[in-house]
Image (cartoon, rainbow, N blue to C red):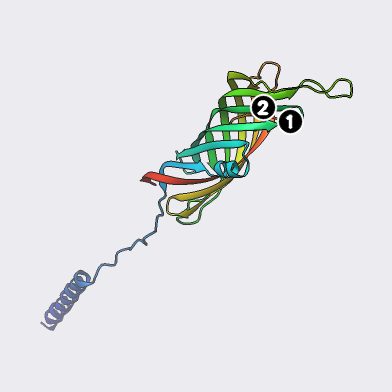
Amino acid sequence: MYKYIISICLLFVYANGFSQENHQKKTEPKIEKIKKDSIIYKTGYGLRLGIDISKPALAIVDKSYSGLELVGDYRISKNWYVATELGFEEEITFEEFTKSTSKGSFIKLGANYNAYKNWLDMNNEIYVGFRYGFALFDQTLNSYKTNVGTPYFPSNTIKTPVTETGLTAHWTEIQLGIKVETFKNLFLSAGFSYKIMVSVDDQKNFKTLYAPGFNRVFESNTGFGFNYTISYLIPFINK
């Protein structure tokens, strides 16, 4: 008899303990894994347009020059931009025996690669660029001396201008520069370029000394350039 009573008591204690354990599991709060939020900085992808302010500044101090250049680029990936420059230039070149004027329009097409790794939401650039350039221009030989003067044969200066139109120039150039975002979407840029002339038309009996967009043409058919631009980004999307 006592054996049965003890067995029933043990069964009751076991059942009561099992019931309390289940109840405790149901009432305990669930601990979920909380993912830490990570801040993602997005930057604008769009069209950036600007002007080379070094050319109007040069025209102020050098009366033999006038010019205007517009610049633009479009971001196609994290580090790559398609880029272009177009404009108009007129330059009077003074040599020992000649005075000539080159006047015309130009366009340059190519791409820039940004080698600078920005921090957080910065949008600056240290870029390397490549361009193909084309110019359509007129060349005028304003005056020239026929020969070197001597006591017996004085030099003769011809002042009748001779103009040839529809001349062209083709070249390639490598650019190095920096772009800094000074205010939201507003950029200042400074750059240097090394140019190699591929082909250029010369005026009859006179070599082209200056090509718009290329600058001075040296004997080695190379040239140099510098620009200082201000531009504004029109963002289409943020990535």
* Of 225 and 100, the residue lying toward us: 100
Furthest-bottom residue in view? Answer: 2
SS assignment at label 2? strand
Q: Which of the marked residues, 1 or 2, is nearer the chain's N terminus? A: 1
In the rendered image, the vertical position of residue 131 relative to residue 45, given as above or below = above
Residue 54 percent across, percent down from the top left: 57, 44
* Of 49 and 6, the residue lying toward us: 49
Tell me the quarter of the image containing the N terminus. bottom left
Residue 219 percent across, percent down from the top left: 74, 28
Residue 12 percent across, percent down from the top left: 14, 77
Q: Residues within 10 Å of mark 2 (few under 14, many from 20)?
A: many
Task: Tell me the kind of residue under disc 2.
Answer: Ser
Mark 2, residue position: 100
Are the residues flagged by discs 1 and 2 in contact, CB closer than 8 Å? yes
Image quadrant assignment for residue 225: top right
Q: Would residue 163 appear left or right of 24 to someone viewing this image?
A: right
Residue 30 seen from this side: yes
Residue 214 seen from this side: no
Mark 1, residue position: 95
**Residue at position x 81%, y 23% in the image:** 155
Residue 196 percent across, percent down from the top left: 66, 29
Q: Would residue 48 appear left or right of 201 to someone viewing this image?
A: left
Q: Would residue 30 appear left or right of 165 to someone viewing this image?
A: left
Q: Would residue 69 appear left or right of 221 to someone viewing this image?
A: left
Task: Tell me the kind of residue under disc 1.
Answer: Glu
In the rendered image, the vertical position of residue 99 relative to residue 80, given as above or below = above
Furthest-left residue in view? Answer: 1
Q: Residues within 10 Å of mark 1 (few under 14, many from 20)?
A: few
* Of 148 and 50, the residue lying toward us: 148
